[in-house]
Amino acid sequence: MLFNSYEFIFIFLPLTFFIYFFLTTKKLIIASKVFLVLSSLFFYGWWNVIYLPILLGSIIFNYIVGVKLSKNTGDKNKQLLIWGIVFNIALLGYFKYTDFFIENVNIFLEQEVPLIHLVLPLAISFFTFQQIAYLVDSYKCGTREYNFLNYAVFVSFFPQLIAGPIVHHKEMMSQFSEAKNQILNYNNIATGLFIFSIGLFKKVVIADTFAIWATHGFDVAESLSFFEAWATTLSYTFQIYFDFSGYSDMAIGIALLFNIRLPVNFNSPYKAVNIQDFWRRWHITLSRFLKDYVYIPLGGNRKIRLKTYANLMLTFLIGGIWHGAAWTFVFWGGLHGIALIIHRIWKNAGFRLNKILAWFITFIFINITWIFFRAKDWDDAIKVLKGIVGLNGIVLPEKLKYSLSFLKEFGVSFDDLSNLFELKKRLVITIISFIIIMMKNSQYYKEIFKPNFKFGIFYTLILIYSIFQINKLSEFLYFQF
């Protein structure tokens, strides 16, 4: 079930909200948690009920292992942790990477082993990482959970189940235990609806508009001229920003209706002035996971610099392959790993860039690397890359033909561009979107939000407008990972 669907907005969410708080007000706390788990499982199973047993099996297995890790210590506990992690990675690997592995074996060994064509279970990348973090925390005695119902709530809570944030047990479950969170909080309801409406607007009005243009450039067009290629890359750059930002806002807003505060997962990443700053702002909980459970265990920056750089690269290669079973994702992760190494060397040398220049370089780098993230294969990526460096030519509007005719000597051609990619409309929306990105973000407004007539009118209007823009099912991009 999608947050941006009529059945979720008008049926599932209201019913779940009212029944949950009806049970809590009657002091039926266990019943309310059971209902929340069942509702979350229904929410998950709406997409494909066949994969519901995988989620349930994963929850049961990790709960049992987590309990044993919490009760015991020593080498046997370490072995149990290792087996627990291996199980989770194997489950993820089977569904996500089996066909990828077979494809590469066929290429290198010149075989024709048939693909299995497994459909990736929804959210498996997220609930796997979340439960790996839980097992490690249990091993370190940072988490103790002996109640299966509580653990099921922790993993399956529907606002964060599908695409994060990747939460820690300690930052989630204590909130469900607080008595004040078991009663209606009208300020949280108003704030939650406010943030949800902003997220819905970002998704269905902005992100889905850019998606049309990005899809045309990446998947439909056979070749792209200079301006077409840049329009395509910028369209995806803005699409993924508003898509993920919209989801993050909606998840935070929905959770707040239930008096649960999810960690911030998105903090104006396109304001970043270097690549490290970007990863402190983009998918914050994933960055936290990679740092705490991959980078630091590898040695972090505690050893010689060469080892630190190797740890950075390996961490981001893992982050790349986590996003998708394709070499383009690995390459994307590798590019970010290289950028972080260069940034670390630059910083250690004591060099500094002008802030505006640093921002521009960072933004252009992110924009270009998104090409490999979005492209379905290397051919699509190369097609767009050739366009942005002008190898497919530069085309200007016909009306500039006479005033700029001297540019023909440099390979510039002139044509009627009035209908290509709806250039004027795209330019206006891109400029507006860029302005929105540079403004205060939704988390800032969440913190200063006070229910009043002005805010009420604002979010009512954008909510109504967004609802009328829901004309087709449009999945969030991170649902695919």
Image (spheres, helix red, strand yellow):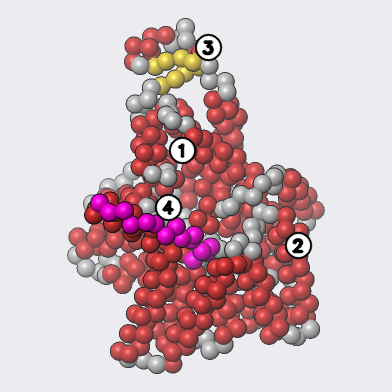
Q: Earlier in the sequence, mark 4 or mark 2?
A: 2
Residue 367, above or below 43 = above
| Residue denoted by label 1 | 218
Front: mark 3 or 2: 2
Q: Earlier in the sequence, mark 3 or mark 1?
A: 1
Mark 4 to mark 3 CA distance (whole Å): 40 Å
Q: How crowded is the residue under tag 2: few (<14 C-alpha within 10 Å), some, or many (20+)? A: few
Which of the 4 image quarters holds residue 175?
bottom right
Q: Secondary structure beneath disc 1?
A: helix
Q: Is mark 4 on a helix, strand or loop?
A: helix
Over which residues does the magenta segment extend? 110-124
Q: Which of 197 and 204 is in front in this view?
A: 204
Residue 111 lies in magenta, yes or no?
A: yes
Q: On residue 278, which mark appears? A: 4
Label 1 packing within 10 angstroms: few (<14), some (14-19), many (20+): many
Which residue of the protein is positioned furthest toward the top in this rendering? 402
Position of 460 compared to 79: left or right?
A: right
Asked if marks 1 and 2 touch (Cβ < 8 Å), the reply is no
Report the residue marked by disc 3: 399
Do the residues bearing badges 1 and 4 touch, measured as CB atoms within 8 Å?
A: no
Which mark sits nearer the N-terminus, 3 or 2?
2
